[in-house]
């Protein structure tokens, strides 16, 4: 049994985890930086401990500080949320060595799947379709360029240790390849501490579709349906929904089955997400596995009635899944909009400040995951996510109408603060999105 969880994260996800823990009767410790000492999760959690100053490398990414916080507060488990240390295999390994239950997959599985090139090999062996690309991580630009020439342009150069939409560059011709390769390698080294890259064919018009999976330590694995995450800027998602609209069952069913097959083949445990690209002909290709809870997990919760954080905790405690694939009953449509403190008119530049006004929408079948409040000072150190507005309805037209109404009700204002709310409201009315004909480059096309 898990008795006390240290939440090694901040913002809305930290508060969301703390709420489920309270429902389960599990005590919580909020690990926070000095910039977050007055945050919502600090007020909500049973205990809190400051782990460092504002910069994340000195606080939320400081493994010794997080471990020490768990030790001094008597926590027996750590929930990493998403981002920060959530996919850090070294952190998961240190937790295990210190007798702490890491609420996530085993460190060796995380290490294998966190290396995107290795993950491609594992999934290829499991029979998942892949885009043409590198079999390994070429050491020299010339070798990578040869792969690009063989598979044909455009290609995308990706960091093997990448994640969160960072460390990837689209290259349209051979003349631009060497420069793009060097730039991506420098970015990967700076951001992930690992400059290894791989190359794969780029699909200029594709849907980004992902599958939520759950697996336990007893050999059981299920999927919870497919989510569409195609509306993105700079590979960062803005709108997510489930089920993936406009995709027929003959595409979605084998895609979800492939995700379960990959889950079992890799030895995955816990909640995870298999990400795919789907081309205009309905062919799908494996991209990567996110070894953590996704930002967009609420849409899956809304249609299935399952609490994914509770399932994570039960699996981490060694319990078997309490249901089979046949028991998963997804109903209706759920859509999530990410409200970021960013200025869409300035290429989505961060727009932090102090919220003088913050009023969240409410009403039937509207969920808002947020840590924001009037008077909240948005730190410049972290991700710009302020809130996630999530709606449910029996069908897509009514879900879209409900989300439009919810965004109309949302108010977030203060000196210097700009949010993506108005931009998102426009996206919901765009004919391509309404017709489920959107793809991963739609926003780029609209803002170029």
Image: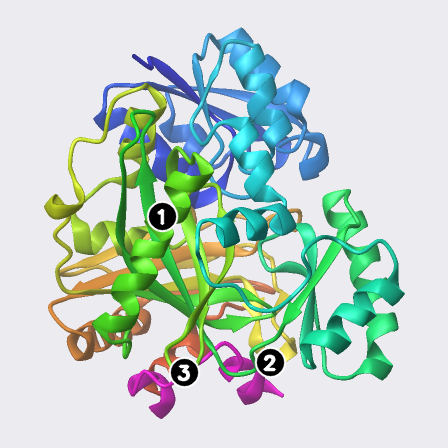
Q: Decide which of 8, 40 is in the foreground and name it.
A: 8
Q: Position of residue 247 (x, y in %)?
A: 28, 76
Q: CA distance from mark 1 to mark 3?
A: 28 Å
The quadrant of the rendering that contains the N terminus is top left
Q: Is residue 400 left or right of residue 52?
A: left
Q: Find disc 2 in the rendering and name its residue.
A: 345
Snapshot quadrant of residue 275? bottom left
Q: Nearer the viewer, mark 1 or mark 3?
A: 1
| Residue at the limit of the structure toward the bottom, as seen here | 431
Other-residue count near label 3 (Cα within 10 Å), few / some / many at <14 / 14–19 / ≥20: many
Asked if the residue under mark 2 is in contact with the one under mark 1, i.e. CB atoms within 8 Å, the reply is no
83 in relation to 419, above or below? above
Q: Which residue is mark 3?
A: 438
Instruction: Report whether residue 338 is seen.
Output: yes
Residue at figure coordinates x 64%, y 76% from the top left: 347
Answer with the quarter of the image where residue 233 lies. Answer: bottom right
Q: Residue 70's spot in the image, x, y percent?
A: 52, 14
Disc 1: CA contacts within 10 A as few (<14), some (14-19) or many (>=20): some
Q: Give percent across and percent down for residue 439.
A: 45, 80
Pick the residue in front: 220 or 93: 220
Is residue 33 on the magenta stretch?
no
Which segment did they paint magenta? Answer: 430-448
Q: Secondary structure at mark 2?
A: helix
Among the two numbered marks 1 and 2 on one chain, the one whose residue lies closer to the N terminus = 1
Q: Position of residue 311 (x, y in %)?
A: 27, 33
Label ID, residue 261: 1
Q: Relative to the observer, which residue lies in front, 82 or 47?
A: 82
**Mark 3 to mark 2 CA distance (whole Å):** 21 Å
**Residue 156, picture quadrant:** bottom right
Q: Secondary structure at mark 3?
A: loop
């Amino acid at each position: 049994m898990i008795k006390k969880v240290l939440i090694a994260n901040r913002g809305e996800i930290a508060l969301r985890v703390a709420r489920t823990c309270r429902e389960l009767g599990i005590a919580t410790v909020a690990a926070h930086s000095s910039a977050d000492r007055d945050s919502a999760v600090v007020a909500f959690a049973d205990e809190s401990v400051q782990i460092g100053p504002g910069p994340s490398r000195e606080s939320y990414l400081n493994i010794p500080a997080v471990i020490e916080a768990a030790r001094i507060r008597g926590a027996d488990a750590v929930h990493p949320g998403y981002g920060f240390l959530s996919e850090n295999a070294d952190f998961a390994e240190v937790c295990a060595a210190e007798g702490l239950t890491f609420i996530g997959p085993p460190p060796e599985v995380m290490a294998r799947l966190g290396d995107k090139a290795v993950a491609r090999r594992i999934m290829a062996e499991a029979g998942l379709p892949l885009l043409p690309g590198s079999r390994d991580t070429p050491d020299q630009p010339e070798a990578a360029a040869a792969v690009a020439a063989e598979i044909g342009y455009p290609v995308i150069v990706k960091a093997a240790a990448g994640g969160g939409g960072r460390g990837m560059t689209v290259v349209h011709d051979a003349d631009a390849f060497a420069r793009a390769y060097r730039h991506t390698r420098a970015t990967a080294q700076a951001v992930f501490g690992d400059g290894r890259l791989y190359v794969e064919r780029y699909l200029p018009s594709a849907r980004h579709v992902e599958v939520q999976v759950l697996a336990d330590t007893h050999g059981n694995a299920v999927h919870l349906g497919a989510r569409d995450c195609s509306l993105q800027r700079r590979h960062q998602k803005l709108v997510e929904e489930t089920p993936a609209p406009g995709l027929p069952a003959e595409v979605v069913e084998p895609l979800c089955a492939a995700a379960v097959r990959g889950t079992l083949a890799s030895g995955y445990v816990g909640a995870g997400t298999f990400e795919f690209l789907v081309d205009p002909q309905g062919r799908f290709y494996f991209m990567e596995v996110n070894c953590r809870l996704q930002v967009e997990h609420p849409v899956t919760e809304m249609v299935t009635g399952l609490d994914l954080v509770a399932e994570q905790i039960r699996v981490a405690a060694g319990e078997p899944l309490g249901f089979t694939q046949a028991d998963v009953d997804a109903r209706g449509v759920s859509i999530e909009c990410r409200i970021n403190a960013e200025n869409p008119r300035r290429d989505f530049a961060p727009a932090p400040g102090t919220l003088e006004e913050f009023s969240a929408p409410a009403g039937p079948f509207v969920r808002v995951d947020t840590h924001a409040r009037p008077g909240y000072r948005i730190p410049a150190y972290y991700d710009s996510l302020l809130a996630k507005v999530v709606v449910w309805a029996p069908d897509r037209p009514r879900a879209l109408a409900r989300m439009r109404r919810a965004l109309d009700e949302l108010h977030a204002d203060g000196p210097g603060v700009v949010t993506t709310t108005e931009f998102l409201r426009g996206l919901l009315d765009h004919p391509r999105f309404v017709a489920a004909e959107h793809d991963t480059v739609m926003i780029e096309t609209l803002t170029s």
